[in-house]
Amino acid sequence: MNRNLNYVAGLLMMIALTVFACLFSVDAEAASKTYRDLSDTETTEDNMAEVGDWYFYMEDGSVYMAASDIEVPEEIAEDVSGSFITNGTYCYYVKDDTIYRYKISSGKTSRIHYIGEDSDVIHVYSNSIYYAKESEEGETQIHCYNKKKGKDRVILKHVDDLSFNCYGKYMTFVDSRTGYLRVRNCSKGKNYTICKEAAYYVRCFGKKVLYVTNVNDTDYVMSYRYSTKKNTALAEVNPAIEDAAFTSNAKKFCYLLEGSYYKLNLTTKNVKVIEAEDFQDIKNNR
């Protein structure tokens, strides 16, 4: 009898541990998804941005979502002012000077926090929502609102308002006083300088930042690794580039030059011509 009880107890413990492990893995996966700002992409109903398992586009202050690129999109938010960010599970946006959250699985919209005029939500990490707001002196500042503690504070006071790029716990920005490209570790609350020259087409990834800058009168695609805090020149590029974007796998650099579009493989250094539609798809789905 005792042996049977011990067997049942052991079996129940194994089941409980398995369920816990599955739940933990789902939470970890959800937490690893980074947010994308869709307000800076040229999306339409015929050219939507794919994030996770969903497709999105913005038009006239409204945000639309569909389960596929051939499905008729439904409106999930209206009167959106400024940015709209999503990780494919949650969507955050500003309406009536207030941050709102839309949960995709339930279709529920929640009011989160009033942030005032001239503000844009730019990133979400852990329990914190980051938003940009203009100070009384006319400078862009980054605020951090902790959802769990209900506290709001300024974490960066001098920021170029067009320089934000975020991935997970990392946020890149340009210091408006010095022009330096810097990165903030949102987990540790620390800032590091990446580059002291003008930087362009900056893109955060999980382990590094890619950008273009000038070194000794030559433009290069550069890679900055968070772990080593070191920069590496990956490829030389033409300084006359008009527009550019990195692919989502961080392996290719696509750009517009003299009316034609190109894709540069950062490993092999091979370059091939691509169509304008392909370039826009890369920008929308980065």
Image: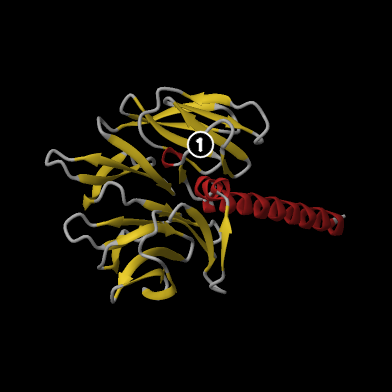
123 displayed left or right of 264: left
Q: Quadrant of the N terminus?
A: bottom right
Task: Write down the residue under mark 1.
Answer: 43
What's the residue at 57%, 53% (across, down)? 28
Residue 60 x %, y % = 43, 25
The residue lying toward the viewer, choosing from 157 and 246, is 246
| Residue 47 in view (yes/no) | yes
SS assignment at label 1: loop
What's the residue at 57%, 55% (across, down)? 274
Colour scheme of the rendered structure: secondary structure
Most distant residue in the left direction: 137
138 displayed left or right of 232: left
The residue lying toward the viewer, choosing from 263 and 38, is 263
**Where 36 falls versus 28 (above or below)?**
above
Residue 6: name its quadrant: bottom right
Residue 229 x %, y % = 36, 73
Residue 236 x %, y % = 42, 72
| Neighbour tally class for label 1: few under 14, some 14-19, many 20 plus, Cα within 10 Å | some
**Where 177 falls versus 110 (above or below)?**
below
Residue 266 x %, y % = 52, 70
Residue 133: name its quadrant: top left
